[in-house]
Image: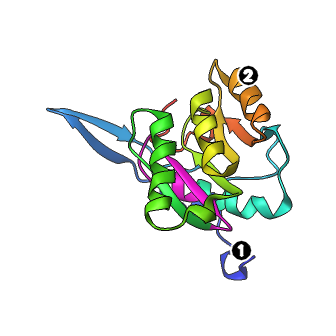
Amino acid sequence: ENPALASFGLKSLDRTPRFRHLAGPVWLKQDPPLFVFDRAHPEIRIECGEVRERDWPTIFFGCALVSRSGSNQFAIFNNCTAEANGVGQQSRVDAVLLAVRRAEDRGRRSALKGSIGVHDAFCFNQDAMEAAAAGGVRLIFAPRGSVHDADVFARAAELGLTVVSLPNKMCRMFARHG
């Protein structure tokens, strides 16, 4: 822990709304993401698998980075290091595949083994879970609340993945829409 940051809290976060141009005269007002990961929150769930004590700092770090990036992304972290980011994809499986490819392109494929993936929205479909597992991801953090959650979590368990989740309404990381 950093004692210099001890006095900071939620009140220290920037609460200035952002405005994003959509088209013509249409603007979207977005409140800044104020989600702060709290491991002790009663809504946190380990859907399947096991979280190691040393995983938590990387999960926190991943959530912090993903909450400040673009929409529809899957980012991969290992030991509090951002290894790759698949952002802006219309397909969740494409976001995973892009992140894995970017790591490979940088010669970082080996760093993906046992890594942690963070998704900014509902836990994705089974094909994205399969792509993440094939890419070397061991643990995934994603908001929950999709009608497909049970099937996706069951497939993750079959693949040997660990899934950590919080409700979408609490931790949707991009634009607070959900």
Residue 7 is one of the magenta-drawn residues: no
Residue 51: % across, % down: 83, 51
What mark, if any, has residue 70 been given in the picture? none
Within-10-Å neighbours for mark 2: few <14, some 14–19, many 20+:
few
Q: In this view, does 126 lie above or below 70?
A: above
Tell me the mark number nearer the camera, choosing from 2 and 1.
2
Residue 36 visible in the snapshot: no
Bounds of the magenta segment: 64-80
Q: Disc 1 marks which amino acid?
A: Ala
- Residue 132, located in which quarter of the rendered image? top right
**Of 55 and 105, which appears nearest the observer?**
105
Residue 87 visible in the snapshot: yes
* Residue at 44% across, 32% down: 91
Is 166 positioned to the left or the right of 48 in the image? left
What mark, if any, has residue 150 been given in the picture? 2
What mark, if any, has residue 6 been given in the picture? 1
* Residue at 71% across, 74% down: 6
**Of 47 and 78, which appears nearest the observer?**
78
* Residue at 39% across, 48% down: 17
**Of 4 and 131, which appears nearest the observer?**
131
Q: Disc 2 marks which amino acid?
A: Ala
Total labels drawn: 2
Using the numbered discs, state the Cα–Cα distance from disc 2 to disc 1 in whole angstroms: 39 Å
**Quarter of the N terminus within the rendering:** bottom right
Residue extending farthest to the top is: 147
Residue 18: % across, % down: 35, 48
Q: What element carries label 1?
A: loop
Residue 57: % across, % down: 72, 64
